[in-house]
Image: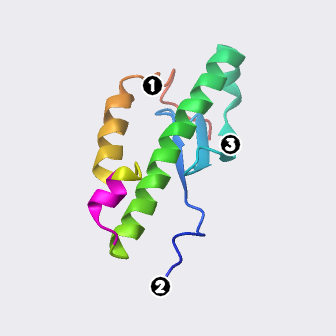
């Protein structure tokens, strides 16, 4: 049995183009960043906003992982709701809604 109280949960989220990818903990702390140099053309403010957005998405996915584990350990859904832990379905729905906000890739061609 896994000790879900001391386990650090993390998840990865990235832009539709894959030019910014963030790995973050369930508390929103980024633990890894991968930024394509083409993102720099949008300026620091836009890049920072993109990173924060991806941190929030990764954080939600990590919290959903914790919810799944706690549910498997027998914690009632009411308690998980009060803890503010989202379901995987809620995270997927939010990801689909946020897809419209992401910039489309400037080109579908990738350097080989």
Observer-nearest of 59 and 20: 59
Dot placed on the residue nearer the N-terminal end, 3 or 1: 3
Q: Main secondary structure of the magenta part?
A: helix
* Residue carrying label 1: 102
- Badge 3 crowding class, 10 Å Cα cut-off, few under 14, some 14 to 19, many 20 or more, is some
Relative image position of residue 49 (x, y in whole percent): 60, 23
Is 77 covered by the magenta stretch? yes
Can you say which quadrant of the picture contains the C terminus? top right
Q: Is residue 40 left or right of residue 68?
A: right
Given contact means CB atoms under 8 Å apart, are the residues at marks 3 and 1 in contact?
no
CA distance separating discs 2 and 1: 39 Å
Residue at 53% x, 77% y is 3
Residue at 49% x, 54% y is 62
Range drawn in magenta: 75-81
Above or below for 100 versus 84: above
Quarter of the image for residue 110 reads top right
CA distance separating discs 2 and 3: 31 Å
Above or below for 86 versus 8: above
Observer-nearest of 10 and 7: 7
Would you say residue 87 is visible in this rendering? no
Dot placed on the residue nearer the N-terminal end, 2 or 3: 2
Relative image position of residue 20 (x, y in whole percent): 60, 35
Is 69 covered by the magenta stretch? no
Given contact means CB atoms under 8 Å apart, are the residues at marks 2 and 3 in contact?
no
* Residue carrying label 3: 33
Above or below for 91 versus 103: below
* Residue carrying label 2: 1
Q: Is residue 81 left or right of residue 3?
A: left
Q: Is residue 38 left or right of residue 9?
A: right
Helix, strand or loop under label 3:
strand
Relative image position of residue 47 (x, y in whole percent): 65, 23
């Amino acid at each position: 049995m896994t000790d879900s109280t001391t386990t650090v949960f993390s998840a990865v989220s990235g832009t539709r183009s894959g030019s910014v990818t963030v790995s973050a903990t369930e508390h929103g702390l980024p633990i890894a960043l991968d930024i394509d140099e083409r993102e720099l053309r949008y300026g620091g403010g836009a890049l920072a906003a993109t990173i924060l957005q991806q941190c929030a998405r990764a954080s939600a996915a990590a919290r959903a992982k914790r919810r799944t584990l706690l549910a498997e350990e027998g914690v009632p859904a009411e308690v998980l709701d009060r803890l503010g832990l989202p379901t995987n379905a809620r995270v997927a729905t939010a990801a689909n809604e946020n897809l419209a906000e992401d910039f489309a890739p400037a080109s579908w061609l990738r350097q080989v």
